[in-house]
Amino acid sequence: MLNIILCGAPGSGKGTQSEYIVKKYGLEHLSTGDLLRHEIASGSRFGQQIDAIISKGNLVPDDVMLRLIDQYLEKLPAGTKGVIFDGFPRTLNQAIEFEKMLAHKQTSSHLIDLHVDEDELIHRLLERGKTSGRSDDNLETIKKRLVIYHHQTEAVSKYYKDLKKYYAVNGTGTVEEIFGRICSIVDSL
Ligand code: AP5
Ligand code: MG
C-alpha cells in the first residue's frame, strides 16, 4: 500500500491537494477533520463533545483519534491501493501508535509537509470562513490552531524526518503548481 500523510498547518491546502492526489493516483482519502465534522453534524452525544473541542481550536484526545483510525484501517477493503491521511497524525504519540498499526499490516507511510507563511494561512482561512460555516474559521480560533500546530504537530514532522520518510513542499503558488511538486514526490515513492 502507498500511504501518504499530508501534513501542514491549518489552511496549508491539505484538503485541496488531497482531492487532486486521490483523482490522479486512485488512493483513498481520510480527512480526520471531515470525519469529526461528520460526527458533529449527526447530532450524536459524541459529536457534541467533539464540537466543544474543535470550536475552541483544541485537539481531540489521542485515544479517541487512534480508535477512529484503527476502525478505519480495519474496514479498508482488500486490494486498496493506499490512503491519503489528511490531518492525521497530529501528535507524536499518534504518529508512533499509527506506525505500529501500519506495521501490523506490513506497511508504513511517508509524510509530505506543506509549508506556507503564517500571514497567507490566516488570509486563506479568514476568506474561507466567510462561507465555510466552520466554527473554527474565525481569527481567535485560527491563532489558537496555529499555536497548537507549532507545539504539537511539528513533532510529527521531526519523527518522520528521523525515519527518512519526510518530504517538504512549498505550499504557496497556484493549486496546480503545488500539485506538480507533490506529484514529483509521489511518483518517486
Ligand atoms: P482539520 O479539518 O484537519 O483542519 P486544519 O488542519 O486546521 O486544516 P484545514 O482543513 O483548515 O485546512 P487545509 O490544510 O485542509 O486547507 P484547505 O485545502 O482547506 O481539523 C480540524 C480540527 O479537527 C482540529 O483543529 C482538531 O480539533 C480536530 N482534529 C482533526 N484531526 C485531528 C487529529 N488527528 N487529532 C486531534 N484532533 C484532530 O485550504 C484552506 C483554504 O485555502 C481553502 O479555502 C482553499 O480553497 C484555499 N487554498 C488552498 N490552496 C490554496 C492555494 N494554493 N492558494 C490560495 N488558496 C488556497
Ligand atoms: Mg482540511
Image: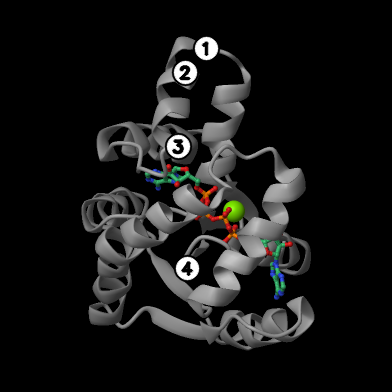
Q: Are marks 1 and 2 in contact (CB under 8 Å)?
A: yes
Tell me if residue 12 comes above or below residue 50 in the rendering.
below
Q: CA distance from mark 3 to mark 1?
A: 15 Å
**Residue sitting at 68 percent across and 82 percent down?**
178
Which disc, if any, is residue 19? none
Q: CA distance from mark 1 to mark 2?
A: 6 Å
In-image side of 162 versus 24 (left or right): left
Report helix, strand or loop for mark 4.
strand
Which disc, if any, is residue 48? 2
- Where does the image place residue 37, in percent across and percent down from the top left? 57, 33
Mark 2 Cα-neighbour bin, 10 Å: few <14, some 14–19, many ≥20:
some
Q: Are marks 3 and 4 in contact (CB under 8 Å)?
A: no
Mark 3 Cα-neighbour bin, 10 Å: few <14, some 14–19, many ≥20:
many
- Where does the image place residue 115, in percent across and percent down from the top left? 50, 80
Report helix, strand or loop for mark 3.
helix
- What amino acid is found at the position of numbered circle 3 in the picture? Ile
Label 4 C-beta lies within 8 Å of the nearest ligand 1 atom = yes
Q: Which residue is mark 3?
A: 54
Q: Which residue is mark 1?
A: 44
